[in-house]
Image (cartoon, grey):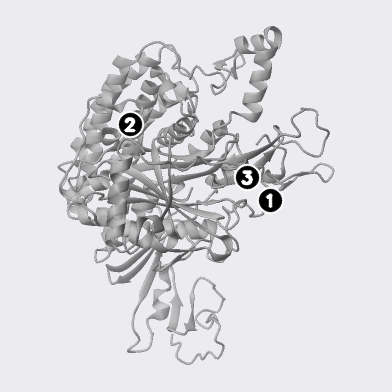
Amino acid sequence: MSTENVSYTSAEAEFDDSIDDEFDPYSGSYDTTEGRVYTVSGGDWDTISAAPEGEKDRIVVNMGPQHPSTHGVLRLILEIDGETVTEARCGIGYLHTGIEKNMEFRSFVQGVTYVTRMDYLTPMFNETAYCLAVEKALDVTEQVPERASVIRVMMMELNRIASHLVALATGGMELGALTAMEFGFRERELVLDIFEMVSGLRMNHAYIRPGGVAQDLPEDGVQKIRETVPLLRKRLKDTVDLLVDNSIWMGRTVGVGYLDLTGCMALGITGPILRATGLPHDLRKSQPYCGYENYEFEVCTETTNDVYGRFLIRIREMEQSLRIVEQCLDRIKPGPVMIEDKKIAWPAQLSIGSDGQGNSPEHIKEIMSESMEALIHHFKLVTEGFRVPAGQVYSAVESPKGELGCQLVSSGGTRPYRVHFREPSFNNLQSVAVMSEGSMIADVIAAVASIDPVMGGVDR
Amino acid sequence: MSEPSVPAVPEGVRELDVIGVRHGAFGASGSGDTSGFGGLVEPIVLPAPAIRPFGGWYDEITDEIELSIADRGVPATDAIEKVVIWRDEITYHVRREHLLNFATALRDEPGLRFEICLGVSGVHYPHETGREFHAVYLFLSITHNCRIRVEVSVPEDDAHIPSIVAVYPMNDWHERETWDMFGIIFDGHPALTRILMPDDWPGHPQRKDYPLGGIPVEYKGGTIPPPDQRRSYH
C-alpha cells in the first residue's frame, strides 16, 4: 500500500489512518520537521515497505521498559542499522518512588524500612550503608557491639551471594541459558531461607538498625547457617561446571561489552566491572567497615574487560563470600546485638508469641507494670525517635554492584534533613552506551546483564 | 521549622551556618503548651569551620589543593570559602566560579589524583537566604585511598553552577538528577534534562517547599494532611 498520496498540512503530528481501516494509535506515520516518522510494532513492517526512494533510514527501537531482558523497567533506546546498534541510550525513572524524600518525614529508625526497598536484591547493603551513616553522625561507630558487626558482615556476604546468583540467573536467562537461571534461583532460595530465619522476611528485611541489628540470631541460627554453607558451595560448583567452559556461553560473553580501565575511570565505574579490568579496588580492603579488616579473603580480578570476566569475578566472589561467612561463624561470640545506649537502642527484642505474631512479653511487663521511666522511654523512642547532631556524613560499603554510598544530612532533629544514596547501578548504567554501541543488538543484552542494574536502586 | 523568624544566634558566631530555628521541644502547635517547653527557641547550626592546623592528613591535602589551585591562577582564599571537618570527614566549601578549576586540580595533580567523583547531590536550606541550594560533591582517590567532600552554595534565584562533566564524565547523570530534584542548573552540561521524573513534570520534588499531597479518607470527609503538615516531633 502506498502512502505517497497522503498529504499533511498541519505542522502537528497527525496519524495516518489510511493504512488500515481501523485507526490504530500504535501503528501509523506522521510528518515531522525531520521527515516522515513511522511508528510500527510487530507485524506492521509491511506497511512501511513503500517508503519513498532516497529517504534516509533511521530506525529507533524502544527496548523496554517492559522487555523481559532489560532487568526490570529499564528502557533502552537503540538506534539500529540492520542488526548493529549505532546509538544506545537509557531511559530510567520508571521505578522512581521518592524514597529519599519520604525518608525526610520518618524517624531515623524508620528510614531503614525505606532503604531496604531501594535495590531490592541487596537489602542488607542498603541498610548497612544507611546505618553506618547514622552511627557516624551520632559518633557511636565504636560502640556497636562486636556480635552485631559480625552478624552484619555475615548477612552482607550471604546477600552478596544471593545478589550475584540473581545476576547470573537473569543474565543467563537473557542469553538463553535457562538452566543457569533455575540453578541461580534455586541456590538463592537457600540464602533467602537463612534471611527468613534470621529476620522473619525473605526480602525487605529492615534487619540492620542504627546501633546494631533488630534481632539476635535464633538459637539454632549459627548451626543452620553452618549446614547451608557446604550445600551452597557444592551447588555453586554446578553453575560453574555449567557455564565456565561452556562454548556457547563463552561465544556470547567473551569480548562482548568491552570496557577497559580508562573507560571505567571516566565513567566512575566500581564493583565487578572495574575489577574485570584488573584493578583490585574493593572498599572492604581499602577502607574497611564493620571489622572487614579481620577477615581473610581475596579481591578477585580479571583482565579481560568483558562480560565473561565480570561473570568469572561474580563466581569467584561468591566463593570468597562463603569463606567470609565461615569465618563469621567461627568468630561469633555471645553478647548484645544492639548498642548499650538506651537513648538509641530499639527498646524491645521481639520473639514469636503463641499467636504467631512478634511480641515481647518481658518488655511489655516491664513498661506496663514495673517502670514508669521505661514506659516514657519506650514511648519517646517509638514515637519520636532519637536525635542526631546537625552535620553531614558519608558512608560507603562495597555492595555487589560497586560502591554504595549514603550521604546523610541531619539538622539535629529526629528525622534526616536529607539523605542521598550514591547507587552503583545508577552510576554504572551510564556505561551502556560505550559498551554496546557498534555491537549487535543481542550483545546489548549481554552488556546490560553484566552491569547487573536493579531498577529499584537506579530510580530509588 | 514552620515559621521563619529572626534567628536567635548568639553574638560572635555569625559566620556559622544557621539552617533553621526550632521552637519548643515537641513540635506541637495550635494547642495549649502542656510541655512547658513551648518558649524554647533554638537555632540549628551546622558544624563550625575548622582552623589550621587541622591535624592528621587534612593539612597535607589542603596544602596540596591550595598550591595546585594557585598554580591555576586563583588564590586559594578566593576559591575556598571555608573548610569544615566533622566526624573525620573534610568538606571544602568552594565558590562556584572556581569549581571547574578546583575539580580539574583534584583530577590532574599527582598529589591529589581523585579519580572518581561519586556524584553530586543537592540540599535545600530555605532558611539560609542567599545560599539556599547546596550542591554536595564527593570525591574518592583510589591512589591515595582518601575521600573529600566539596560543597557549593548558590542562591535560589540564581541557581547556576558550572558543570564538571567535562572533567568528570561520570557526573553526567548525577547532575541531571540534581537538576531534576532541585532545579540547580549545571551550566555547560551536554544535555541537562530530567532523568527520574517525567519530561513534562513541573517543579522539583526534593525542594523543601515542594507541595506534598494529603490523603482523603472515606470517613466524614476527613483527610490525612500532607506529611510536612502533620504533627511531628522534629
Q: Give whichever of discs 1 and 3 has the lower sequence position.
A: 3
Q: Which residue is mark 2?
A: A187
Q: CA distance from mark 1 to mark 2?
A: 43 Å
Q: Is residue B140 above or below residue A54?
A: above
Crowd class of label 1 (few under 14; some 14 to 19; many from 20; radius 10 Å): few
Q: Position of residue A64 (x, y in %)?
A: 42, 59
Mark 1 lies on residue? B213
Quarter holding residue B41: top right
Amino acid marked by disc 3 = Gly
Neighbor class of circle 3 (other Cα within 10 Å; few <14, some 14-19, many 20+) is many
Residue type, numbered disc 2? Glu
- Give the label, 1 or 3, closer to the camera: 3
Q: Are marks 1 and 2 in contact (CB under 8 Å)?
A: no
Given residues A79 and A44, the one toward you in this image is A79
Q: Name which residue type carries label 1.
A: Gly
Kind of element beneath mark 1:
loop
Residue A270 visible in rendering: no
Q: Secondary structure at mark 3?
A: strand
